[in-house]
Amino acid sequence: MLQLFKFKGGVKPQTNKTQSVAAPIGVAPLPSRLFVPLHQSIGGTPRPLVQTGERVLKGQLIGAADGWISSAVHAPTSGTVRAIAEHVAAHPSGLTTLSVEIEPDGRDEWIARTPIDHGAMAPEAVRERLREAGVVGLGGAVFPTHGKLTASKTVPMEELVINGAECEPYITCDDLLMRERAEEVIRGVGVFRDLLQPKRVLIGIEDNKPEAVAALQAAVARLGEDFAVVAVPTLYPAGGAKQLIRVLTGKEVPSTKRSTDLGVQCFNVATAYTAWRAVAHGEPVVSRIVTLTGNVERPRNWEALLGTPLSEFVALGAPKPDTDGYLMGGPMMGFAMPGMDAPLVKATNCIIASSPTLFPPKAPEMPCIRCGECAKVCPHELQPFELYWFSRAKNFGKTQEYHIFDCIECGCCSFVCPSRIPLVQYFRFAKSEIWAREKEKNAADQAKARFEWKTERDEREKAEKAEKLAKAAAAQAAKKAAEAAAAAAAGADASAAPAADAPVDAEAAKKAAIAAALERARAQREAAAPKNTEQLTPAQQREIAAVDALRRQAGIEPAADPAPAEEPKP
Amino acid sequence: MLQVLAALLPGVAAYVWIFGPVILVQLALATATALAAEAAMLKLREKPQAMFLADGSAVVTAWLIALTFPPLSPWWLIVTGTLFAIVVAKHLYGGLGQNPFNPAMVAFAVCIVSFPALMSQWPAVGLKVAFADQVGVVFGLLPRVDAISGATPLDTLKTALKLEDGQFSVAQLLANQDVFGFFAGRGWEWVAGGYLLGGLWLWQRGIVTWHAPLGFIAGLSLLAGGLWLYNPAQFANPLFHLFSGGAMLGAWFIVTDPVSGCTTPRGKLIFGVAAGVLAYVIRVFGGYPDGVAFAVLLMNLCAPLIDLYTQPAIFGMKDKS
Ligand code: SF4
Ligand code: SF4
């Protein structure tokens, strides 16, 4: 029996999961329009590869990964591209993002899919396949999966942790995925295992999902793998990657380190599933399982195409008349969808219809009484009330001293606060302010650097100009001096008149001195300049001479200096 | 907050039994004053009233004031103390959650400095005075005769030890004077026991953690115990100190005040121990009959600093390797 560890803090909200597990995963019908955002994962924004009016096939690449930490985007079904334009995003801000609008043709026609045999391929090629297939963390963080599949060079890979905890209330998409498609999940885990070569593979599932545990255990046995499927205590946020790693391995991953530095890596079960589809079926990520629950007549899990507008998706569940909004994600960490046009994306694990009875408006916020309840439940052992205090006071330096960036925004603190302070909102505000300032500062630094560089360039140019002018003047003077000298010599030769000689001599001497100085400077410059034709060995000289002779023969080049193209290396 | 009030009930019950039901009048007086002052201040500060009044924090302050002031204090003394606590110590500092000092202790300190005589006259236990007469004294209808009030056991002991200058040992004093009971002040033992009971209940319910109360009790007993072992004739035993004066009330209901106390677990412990030590030093060597209030106020001053230096290590940062 595996020894389990505890993480500090945590809360036990009502799970509300039974409503949506009664029916099996349904396949959502094709919507009338799809709005596929190009930016669906952490990292660079993919470049659009299609044009308005173009016909696309299901699975066709429409956005190419931009940069290593970025992930490709594909057409979820066959149809016609109607627009590539800004469209409201599934984000609390209600901001828009560049999206490809596709009108399905109803045929759902696939591109040619090419499975790969990942065992016979180089790891880089497998990672590249995952990147091209748009595989990202489907647990909600949407980090490009290929970026996590390289073991640390210095620390041996010990544990691969697979996250099936799904601890947020209401959400059941991973639960049903594990129940219904256990074998493919396990095969996907096998792909990760092959890439990372860990000593152990641990699959953690909250113990309120016995069916999922049983299904995965059966699949592991069937496939002859040695993965440990472990039921972990039901305690929010056991499904936070760091919490699950702590529970299963006892290791705590600090915010300053990556988990691979401690020899652990963690993936969500749904990610493993899509990785397997990409490898063994050549299918990119074009759909995902989304829980539709809350204030609806028919709560259920649906396999829905990415880009499905919220309005068409929620219709599947028949929302009750008093529905007043839709949450994406769970009640602890989720946010209100900004509009009915907002599409489902890779990060959409759950849509909860809300109503005043389901989520009664919160009683007004009261002052913090420093009761410390929030600190007791914080799984990262922070002091939320101090963070709150400093966030409110906009003392962002202090919030960083109190480790605001260690906050995983799990919402435990807000959940227990007797003064009903929406602590997480304050923290999100503080974090975004700090980022904004950082950005501003960077921008300012860059502007400063640009300015300094420009000033320097101006000065340099000025100096060069001055030098040029001086040179020109000097050349002029030298010429004059030479002429004068010649004239003087001629005069001396002709008449040998010493009377005319003296003043000219003084002038000429000065000019000659300048000319000499210039000559010296030129010689110096030339000495400093690299010369690759110096100190040639006799053999080389012979070679050059031969080449030159050939050239002259061919009439390419007049017999000037040795060609610099033939740089002999000493 | 309601649970805190509930936890005070055993102590209040013992109090009624020992000193008579007049304390109920004082509690009512303080509560009414506190609520009225709170409402007025909220109105002035343009804050929603119902919500804040319902939070119970003003009532807790009122009860602590009523329970720490002598039960026969004139009505205006209680009212003044409560007003001061709510208006100055709480709202002028920004209201709930912002006050650096425990308002009830501020009231106590202000009143004992301003009216030392009135604040140290406690009714002699066992002297049965009719309820009507007690109320009469409180409202100034009856003369305040010394016969019905005197110094607290703590004060009596201190004065006796000082005045007689070594003539009597603690043991003798305790045995001979009837202000003393089994092991502490007569009757006071029961009241303190009541508070202890309520405090343990709060702890068991998870309302308070063990750190501050245990720290306070430990700080007080260790110092008391050390000196008692050193010279039992001059220093009373720890049990006497724990069950006299405001020690138990302080341990469970005052040093546990979240707003003005420490918040980190280690901070709470330090806060408790230091307050316990200070309380002992002030009550035994200082000029006041009891030291809890001043000890707590002094520690309130240090709380932010203690908090700053006792930040617990955060997730993943425990082993500094
Ligand atoms: S739980 Fe709320 S009231 Fe209590 S300390 Fe935390 S923020 Fe303050
Ligand atoms: S939201 Fe942040 S501060 Fe609050 S409990 Fe979670 S990790 Fe701690």
Image (cartoon, helix red, strand yellow):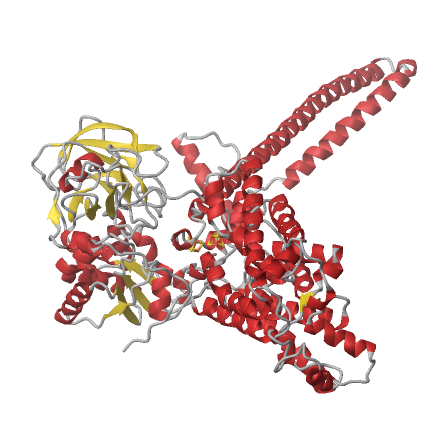
Give the residue drawn at x 69%, y 66%: B149
Which is nearer the eye, B319 or A545?
B319
Quadrant for residue A459, please give it. Answer: top right
Which quadrant of the figure contains the N terminus of chain A? bottom left
Q: Is residue A476 rendered to the left or right of residue A152?
A: right
Which is nearer the eye, B199 or A55?
B199
Quadrant for residue A107, please give it. Answer: top left
Which is nearer the eye, A8 or A177?
A8
Q: Can residue A381 be seen at all in this image of the molecule?
A: no
Quadrant for residue A510, please give it. Answer: top right
Give the image location of residue A557, x and y in percent.
45, 30
Give the image location of residue B21, x and y in percent.
55, 63
Reply above or below: A328 against A52. below
Give the image location of residue A213, x and y in percent.
19, 66
Reply above or below: A486 against A104. above
Residue most extreme to the left: A107
Residue most extreme to the right: A499
